[in-house]
């Protein structure tokens, strides 16, 4: 077993080039899947027998919430790899994740509020699921604020990575909050053991949207990653070559 | 069409949720491209200056 693949993953020029080549392979399928899922969710899926057409908020709310958790988990894993193996590229991945995750956490909170008002009769409740998701937003903002406050990139990488890793305990809390505590929020309908509780015509647009958003995240991450790698390279000759200066 | 836009009376909640989420998605594309463009410009300046401000 050779470790060359691991070393290559830690090589900024290799990752920079790879990220550039891979971006369209994620971006275009993401766009196509999201458009198909929008059509499926808004037009083809039948109205819910209890919530009528109001349930269609799920196609925006659930993927946003999924992004908020999946992006945080990616960020924490990358931060941990960066701390353990002192890998610059891993820190660059973690730093790229934060603004993407934070913005979709806002989308999850806003769409949740828009769903809560007609169904529960309230825009906001200090409920376990809602509160833990709000804490997730503060973790993202804290991470970004901390990075912004430290001028030296290496020190910013290490310090913010500790916050990202510690904050990951919030991820299972959010996911299981609806099972562990009495919550207004409904129980998981897709991310659960056993079969999803949504019918096929309602389910496929949701799964398509989840996949589309995930690929979209990958594309965004790859674009941001290139910038973060450049920010960490001071006088490397490969940068000259790539930029053509 | 009218019926579709009305969303069974939930228009005031369904459409804003789509607008907010898709706006966040589009903004992410713009922000990511801007972040990359800024990093490229900064790297160009450093290279031109012989890495003096490194």
Image (cartoon, coloured by chain):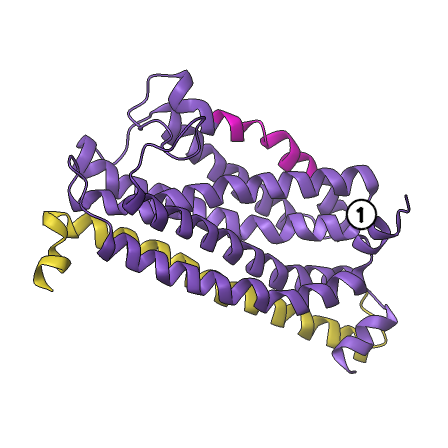
Chain letter corresponding to the colour yellow: B
The part of the image, by quadrant, that contains residue A11 is: bottom right
Please tell me whether residue A49 is drawn above or below residue A93 in the rendered image: above
Quadrant assignment for the N terminus of chain A:
top right
**Where residue A166 appears, x then y in whole percent?**
63, 30
Quadrant assignment for the C terminus of chain A:
bottom right
**Where residue A13 appears, x then y in whole percent?**
80, 65
Please tell me whether residue A113 is drawn above or below residue A4 in the rendered image: above
Disc 1 marks which residue? A87
Q: Residue at x 59, y 31 (%)?
A: A167
Residue at the right extreme of this rendering: A2
Q: Is residue A160 visible?
A: no
**Where residue A95 appears, x then y in whole percent?**
64, 50
The part of the image, by quadrant, that contains residue A218 is: bottom right
Please tell me whether residue A59 belongs to the stretch shown in magenta.
no
Region rendered in magenta? A160-173
**Where residue A73 appears, x then y in whole percent?**
59, 38
Q: Residue at x 80, y 80 (%)?
A: B48
Crowd rating for badge 1 (residues with CA inside 10 Å; few <14, some 14–19, many 20+): some
Please tell me whether residue B38 is drawn above or below residue A92 in the rendered image: below
Chain letter corresponding to the colour purple: A
């Amino acid at each position: 077993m050779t470790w060359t693949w691991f070393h290559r993953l830690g090589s900024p020029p290799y990752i920079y080039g790879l990220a550039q080549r891979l971006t369209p392979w994620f971006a275009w399928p993401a766009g196509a899947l999201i458009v198909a899922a929008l059509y499926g969710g808004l037009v083809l899926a039948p109205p819910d027998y209890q919530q009528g057409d109001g349930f269609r908020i799920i196609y925006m709310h659930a993927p946003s919430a999924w992004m908020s958790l999946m992006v945080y988990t990616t960020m924490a894993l990358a931060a941990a790899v960066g701390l353990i193996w002192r890998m610059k590229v891993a820190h660059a991945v973690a730093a790229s994740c934060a603004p993407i995750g934070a913005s979709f956490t806002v989308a999850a909170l806003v769409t949740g509020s828009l769903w809560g008002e007609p169904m529960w009769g309230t825009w906001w409740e200090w409920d376990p699921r809602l509160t833990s998701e709000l804490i997730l937003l503060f973790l993202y903002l804290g991470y970004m604020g901390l990075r912004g406050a430290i001028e030296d990139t290496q020190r910013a990488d290490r310090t913010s990575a500790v916050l990202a890793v510690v904050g990951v305990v919030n991820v299972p809390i959010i996911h299981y909050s609806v099972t562990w505590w009495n919550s207004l929020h409904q129980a998981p309908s897709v991310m659960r053991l056993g079969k999803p509780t949504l019918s096929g015509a309602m389910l496929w647009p949701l799964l398509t949207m989840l996949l589309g958003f995930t690929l979209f995240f990958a594309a965004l991450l790859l674009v941001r990653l290139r910038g973060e790698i450049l920010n960490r390279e001071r006088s490397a000759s490969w940068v000259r070559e790539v930029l053509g200066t | 069409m009218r019926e579709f836009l009305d969303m069974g009376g939930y228009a005031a909640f369904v459409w804003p949720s789509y607008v907010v989420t898709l706006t966040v998605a589009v903004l992410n594309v713009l922000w990511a491209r801007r972040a990359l463009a800024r990093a490229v410009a900064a790297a160009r300046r450093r290279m031109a200056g012989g890495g003096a401000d490194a």
